[in-house]
Every structure is written in structure tokens, then in C-alpha cells.
Image (cartoon, rainbow, N blue to C red):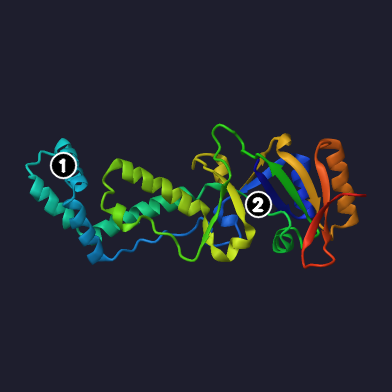
Amino acid sequence: MTKLYKYLSARSGKLVLEDQTLRYSKPVALNDPYDVQLNLRIDFDDEKLKEEREKFANSVEGQHYIKNMLARVNQVVSSKLTHEEAKWAFCNQDIKELYRILENAQITSSNAFRNCKILCFSQEPASALMWAHYSESHQGIVLEFENFTGIDPDNCPKPEPVIYQEEIPKFVDGKRVIKLSEPKIAHQVCNEAVDKHIFTKSKEWEYEREMRIWIGAHPDDPASKEDAQNIPFKKEYLKGVILGCRIKPEDEEYIKKIISKKYPDVKLYKMQKNTKKFQYDIVPYEG
């Protein structure tokens, strides 16, 4: 049972509850300039890479790899390269050319995410920082979702956790860059580039304990031109609404009415300051 929490201002919370939609945003609309808009690192120790190539070329796996590579070349052009010549070409591939290929792949990869849209959640409902930053300094609300699977449970990616780290991830590691001409490896690298772009952030954001869903958009889709898109969610996903400890009385009453009318099975809670520790407790609503 996966619980996800959406921090919102009172105004945004009322709109979400009234319209039964959640906002998916383009990377450019997110509050971190690195978020999805990063260029994955392409850097190798050139000498070490050459050593890795030679070591691989002399292994049983490498011999098989070069044999298959030679067969693919022969299918495209009339080639009389011997195995040893193909091995030499593999071990002495121009590093600058490799960088150029990877940089072009990086540009293609980055461009592919420009029109994607992200929906962000947290795994933590009682974070003082999250309430301060995303719920209007404790005047907003938090929505509790359960088993959220996006627009289409069969086709929409499921929520995945964000990975927090100090360094921008590499586009591909040195050991696999030597085998990039192999379709299986190239496919794996592309899939991993998706995860690195979408689900990697600086450790400074670690307090958010973020889970996110992303959806792609074709450039010809009119929605791809918009920075954000409101998309309906299933009513049964919403299990609870938590009111901030500083919520304004008029917002509190308005949200109570929406829940009573539209979401009768949803539980209502309120944040309360703990009297012994610097923390906030979630308590059943009594009002």
C-alpha cells in the first residue's frame, strides 16, 4: 500500500478538490533549474578507457562482440576487414569522435524531455519544511493519496522515488561505453538516461522525500506547448485531507464543504503543534 502526499496552498487545494485534477508541469516550470534540465556528464579517463577496450577485446566476450560487430559492418558495406583489423579499429577508435557521438546523443536525450510533464508527491506528510515551502507556511493543505497510478493504470508510468546525490550523473559509464554499438547496451543506456534525467536531484532536496510520475508529450500535441496541464485523477485515490495548523477559518470551512459534498469517504485531519518536541502531529479533525 503506497501512500503519497501532495502539498498545496489553500487556493490550489480548493481548485484541485473542486475540479478533481492534478497539475503536471514541464521541467521549465519546476522550482529547481537543474530539475530534468540537466546535461548528464560525459567524461572519461582517456587512457583508462583505451586500457578497458584492449582488455575487453582480448576477452572471450570481446572476441564474440568484435565478431558480431564485423558481421554487422559486412551487412551494410562490402568489407574485407579481418578480425584482427576490426579489433585494432575497435581498440583505437578516436576518443574525440566518441565524445561527439555521445554529445549528440545527450542533446537528443535532453530535447526529448522538454515537453514531458511531471507530477510531484512526497512520502512524508508532516515535514515542517514542506509545509513551509509548499503549503503556504502551514496555511494550506496536504492531500493523501493511496495506490495512485496516474492517468491510465496500464500505460502511465508508476510513481518512482527521486534519487538524491552530490554529482550530476554520467550519461554512460566507461565499461559500457566500449559496447555502445551493441543494440541491447544502447537500449539500456537510453532507458537509464530517462531515469537519470527524471529521477535525479541534488542532495539539498533530500528533505522532500519525493515520488514522481512523468508523462511524455508529442511535439504536435497542443498540450505540449503549455507549461502545465491539469489532468483528472480517480476519486478513489484520495483517502485524506490534512489541514495546516495556520489555515484561515474561511478556507477551512470551504474545504470541509467540498469534502462533505464531493468526497464523503475521505478522512479529514489537521496539523497540530507538538507540546514537547519541535514537530507537528496529524490528528483527526474535530470541528
Q: Residue at x 86, y 37 (%)?
A: 261
Q: Nearer the viewer, residue 110 or 54?
A: 54
Q: Which mark is residue 195?
A: none
- As drawn, 264 above or below 9: above
Q: Residue at x 84, y 47 (%)?
A: 255
Which image quarter is the N terminus in? top right
Q: Residues within 10 Å of mark 1 (few under 14, many from 20)?
A: some
Q: Position of residue 147 (x, y in %)?
A: 65, 39
Q: Residue at x 87, y 39 (%)?
A: 260
The residue lying furthest to the right in this view is 287
CB atoms at circles 1 and 2 under 8 Å apart?
A: no
Choose top left, top right, bottom left or bottom right for residue 107. Answer: bottom left
Please, what secondary structure does the residue beneath circle 2 have? loop
| Residue 14 shows in this picture | no
- Counting residues from the start of the chain, the first of labels 1 and 2 encountered is 1
Choose top left, top right, bottom left or bottom right for residue 257. Answer: top right
Q: Position of residue 132 (x, y in %)?
A: 73, 63
Q: Residue at x 74, y 47 (%)?
A: 143
For label 1, the residue is 67
The residue lying furthest to the top in this view is 154
Q: Is residue 224 left or right of residue 146?
A: left
For label 2, the residue is 123
Image mark count: 2
Q: Is residue 37 left or right of residue 44?
A: right
Q: Is residue 161 left or right of residue 252?
A: left
Q: Position of residue 76 (x, y in %)?
A: 17, 38
The three-letter code of the residue at mark 1 reads Lys
The three-letter code of the residue at mark 2 reads Gln
Q: Is residue 2 left or right of residue 274?
A: left
Q: Nearer the viewer, residue 83 or 252?
A: 83
The residue lying furthest to the front in this view is 276
Choose top left, top right, bottom left or bottom right for residue 103. Answer: bottom left
